[in-house]
Image: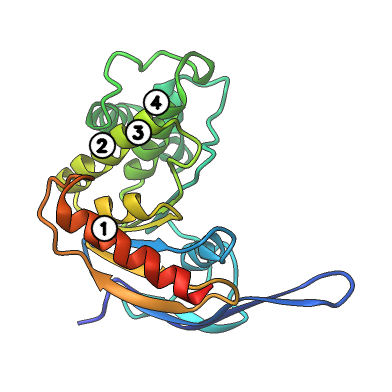
């Protein structure tokens, strides 16, 4: 049986206006199984977002390919939803209307899309804020709207690019727990990008550790810690130390 996502020998080379070459990704290989929560972790500016965009079909690899259920990814599609760090909500639309938007574009009946939107608004804990506008809600709540909107498209794969990177520490911890809760309720394959080692260990079934540019897979680690996890658990702290040391040796 095919993996949900296979990244095979992916290389990405950027060339600027002066003709200078910048190799960002080099021979990247890994797979993601159905309903698995995989975190891509590595230092800042190492090509993690570029890799996620290639999986999403938003960018083309210079070499190699990405397969989704054995089929080559050749562009974006509704089977892969993306949640970015900077959630782009329509400021003139309410929370409900923002969540409904993609279903409206697809021509879904208004009653059905309202039911679906309400389901996912409730799931992300925004019941009572359906009529609020983006300017009236916090950064964490905007992320919840973005997650609800993404789930409404019924994707096979959720791609999340440092979605909590701009949030304060307390809100970030709350959103990590929310993502785990939602993932346990709405089974999806998740690929999550972060440069925060604690976040990676807290969320992941498996961590793909990337090197500095040109970025390659340094190690693929299965996280066997039971859930719910604790940041102060000795096994958690030991794993954090091991992964941090691994990255430091490669710098």
State the separation of the CA atoms marked 3 and 2: 29 Å
Q: Earlier in the sequence, mark 3 or mark 1?
A: 3
The image shows residue 64, relative to residue 160, as above or below, that is: below
Q: Which of marks 4 and 1 is nearer the N terminus?
A: 4
Query: Mark 2–mark 1 contact, CB under 8 Å?
Result: no
Q: Which of marks 4 and 2 is nearer the N terminus?
A: 4
Q: Circle 4 — which element?
A: helix
Q: Earlier in the sequence, mark 2 or mark 1?
A: 2
**Is 136 in front, or is 96?**
136
Residue on which disc 3 sits? 109
Asked if residue 5 lies left or right of residue 10, the reply is left
State the separation of the CA atoms marked 4 and 3: 27 Å
Which residue, as the protein is rendered here, is positioned at the far right?
18
Residue on which disc 4 sits? 141
Q: Circle 1 — which element?
A: loop
Asked if residue 163 lies left or right of residue 212, the reply is left
Q: Circle 2 — which element?
A: helix
**Is 217 in front, or is 85?**
217
Q: Name the mark on residue 204.
A: 1
Query: Mark 4–mark 1 contact, CB under 8 Å?
Result: no
Q: Circle 3 — which element?
A: loop
Q: Which of marks 3 and 2 is nearer the N terminus?
A: 3
Looking at the image, is mark 3 or mark 1 nearer the viewer? 1
The image shows residue 239, relative to residue 109, as above or below, that is: below
Q: Where is residue 240 in the image (x, y as percent from the top left)?
A: 30, 59
Query: Mark 3–mark 1 contact, CB under 8 Å?
Result: no
Residue on which disc 2 sits? 178
């Amino acid at each position: 049986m095919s993996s949900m996502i296979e990244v095979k020998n992916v290389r990405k080379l950027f060339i600027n206006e002066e003709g200078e070459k910048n190799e960002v990704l080099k021979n990247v290989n890994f797979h993601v199984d159905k309903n698995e929560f995989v975190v891509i972790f590595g230092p800042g500016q190492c090509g993690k977002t570029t890799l996620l965009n290639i999986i999403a079909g938003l960018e083309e690899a210079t070499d190699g390919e990405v397969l989704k259920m054995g089929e080559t990814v050749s562009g974006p599609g509704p089977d892969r939803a993306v949640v970015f760090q900077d959630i782009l909500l329509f400021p003139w639309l309410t929370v409900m209307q923002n969540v409904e938007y993609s279903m409206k574009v697809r021509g879904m009946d208004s009653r059905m899309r309202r039911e679906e939107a309400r389901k996912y608004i409730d799931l992300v804990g925004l019941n009572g804020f359906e009529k609020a506008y983006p300017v009236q809600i916090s950064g964490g709540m905007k992320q919840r709207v973005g997650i609800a909107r993404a789930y409404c498209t019924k994707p096979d794969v959720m791609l999340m690019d440092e979605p909590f990177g701009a949030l304060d520490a307390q809100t970030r911890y709350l959103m990590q727990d929310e993502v785990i809760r939602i993932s346990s309720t709405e089974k999806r394959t998740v690929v999550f990008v972060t440069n925060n080692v604690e976040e990676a260990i807290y969320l992941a079934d498996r961590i793909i550790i990337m090197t500095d540019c040109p970025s390659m897979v340094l190690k693929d680690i299965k996280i066997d810690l039971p859930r719910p996890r604790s940041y102060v658990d000795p096994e958690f702290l030991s794993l954090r130390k091991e992964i941090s040391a691994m990255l430091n040796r490669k710098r």
